[in-house]
Image (cartoon, rainbow, N blue to C red):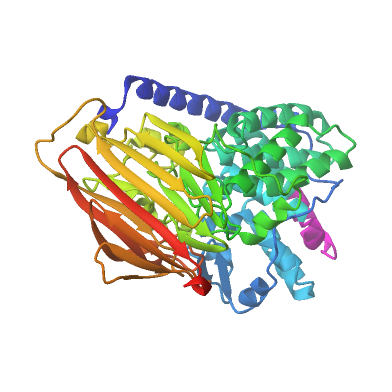
Amino acid sequence: MASRLKISERIRITHLAADRLRREAISSVLCAPPFRWQFSATAAEQLLIVPQDLRTADPSFWDEVEGGQFGLAGAVALADDVSPFDLVPPSEGWARALHGFAWLRHLDAVDRPEAREMAQLLAAEWAMRHRGGGGGLAWEPHVTGRRLISWISHSSLLLEEADAETYEVITESLGLQLVRLAANWRTSASGYPRLLSLLALLLAQLCISGHEAQVSETEKLFVQELERQILPDGGHVSRNPGILVELILDLLPLGQCFVARSRRTPPEFASALKAMLGMLKYMRLGDGMLARFNGMGVASPAGLATVLVYDDNPGAVPANAPASKYIRLERGPAILIMDAGPPPPLESAAEAHASCLSFEFSVGTALMLVNGGAPSSANIEWRAAARATASHNTLCLGEKSSSKLIRHRMLEDLVGGPPIRFPDEVAAKVEAHDGGVELTARHDGYMRRFNLMHHRTLALGAAGRRLLGIDRLAGKSGTIRLRQDVPFAIHFHLHPAVRCRRSDNPSIAVIELPGGDTWWFSLEGARLAIEESTYFADSAGPRRSLQIVARGATFGETEVRWVLEGQHQAET
């Protein structure tokens, strides 16, 4: 509730609200007819560049469309003999994807006259329906930006062999959309949506004739926003590694547009790209995919593979990520990645997770311990559960999360959902020992409720076949005795492909990886249980999985030790 916010946070919300009002006022003025002249022509009379769409196309999408199905953003709507624009959207994510037209790449890949005709029909229909402008989801700045990028990148599909009327309707709409985005990009939500809006505006001004005069100013604004959102180590301010893939897939074609127009590419592009590619490598586990932290959900193997092709130094993984606050340990076949930072700033925390001191662990190409990850937009009802501490590989005290959702109507409207705050204090240190590596960390996320700190030690052996963990609860200074014992649970969520069973010893669980490895999980200081879990980050929707849980109760001073040890099947 608002009453629980710090004074500094209330001030920050006031500043954010004032900034939103200022941006909306500017947009309202610039959208008025007397001011539209400054954005140049309102029709895209000539496309100077057709940038490459680097996202992977799926020609089977056309087969679904022919069958009357529109599958977007993890949801499917039936559009047999009816326009998809007349359907009741199954989700907001589906509607944004529909109006963003990124699906044009799938039709472009089919190379059939029927697919071309469908693309032209739907683009012209959208243009006719929105000729007078309007509002709503279809005109959200980042949706407009995605639509502009899609229409320009696939302009050959939309305009070649089109009749004169269709050609005129689409090109007129392109120009009007550019003018609209130039006026209202300021009203986009903070974070990636605003960055995408500016990127699309800059790309459109480079590609469409008659807008050269606006390029320099938009370039300056985009570079400022890029530097504001991309941290020095290449991470995004939201701490969601998945955003980097999406941004690079658009940033690379934008850079090509500068070259094609014989303009100097901003040096900030190259430095940001190098840092982001380094961060992506840092956040990859043994299966090659990104770890599931702070909004990272369904993986896009093709997208990640595409952007990493542009890495000039593919074998080099950064030694650390001090700005993004993630820690990577790697020995032998094992890779461990821990979230060792507090939540991002309030305006960037609408999708952040209560994952402090959680980790993911892979052996070879097999994922063993994974966080639940973020569900797709088609499964938004799972989002709150996915963000909770209990869905992550860390300690949960008193059945509470280490972070708190901020339910504040104005703030949620400003940032796009309820952000989180806490912990405030997070510290971590990494040291090498006898060929292995040890990570010690702590956070104060439970101080305000229980007056306890969570300390965690993870020690990975030199061969990568042994992981020692120590989870400790203690007061911030000195001995503490709670008025009553508080239950705790240390969660170890297993990937859905992993099997697990209890051994004859009730304190030992046997973990079987898909590739044949068998690992033993042994526990001291708590009761071992094997329970059901949910893996949210799956393209087919949330999946059932298993988790090992160390359960107990603390009176104020508690230490739990656990060990993961593995031996290859051929060695047993």
**Could you tell whether 274 is left or right of 420 in the image?**
right
Residue 491 percent coordinates (x, y):
33, 54
Residue occupying the far bottom of the picture = 67
Is 166 part of what is drawn in magenta? Answer: yes
User: Can you give x and y, in whole percent of width and height, for residue 314 in the image?
Assistant: 73, 49
Residue 55 spot, x, y in % from top left: 70, 57
The kind of secondary structure the magenta stretch mainly shows is helix
> Picture quarter containing residue 398?
top left
- On the question of residue 132 being in view, the answer is no
Is 158 included in the stretch rendered in magenta? yes
Res 7 seen here: yes
From the viewer's perspective, is residue 65 above or below residue 270? Answer: below
Name the residue at the left extreme. 483
Residue name at image x 45 percent, y 31 percent: 345
The percent position of residue 311, horizontal first and vertical second, equals: 74, 47
| Residue 491 to residue 14: above or below | below
Q: Nearer the viewer, residue 375 or 202?
A: 375
Q: Which region is colored magenta? A: 154-172
The number of numbered badges drawn on the structure is 0
Q: What's the residue at 33%, 65% (across, down)?
A: 509
Quadrant of the rendering where the N terminus is positioned: top left
Q: Indicate left or right for 308 with 49 as reference.
A: left
Q: Residue furthest right?
A: 262
Q: Residue at x 75, y 65 (%)?
A: 108
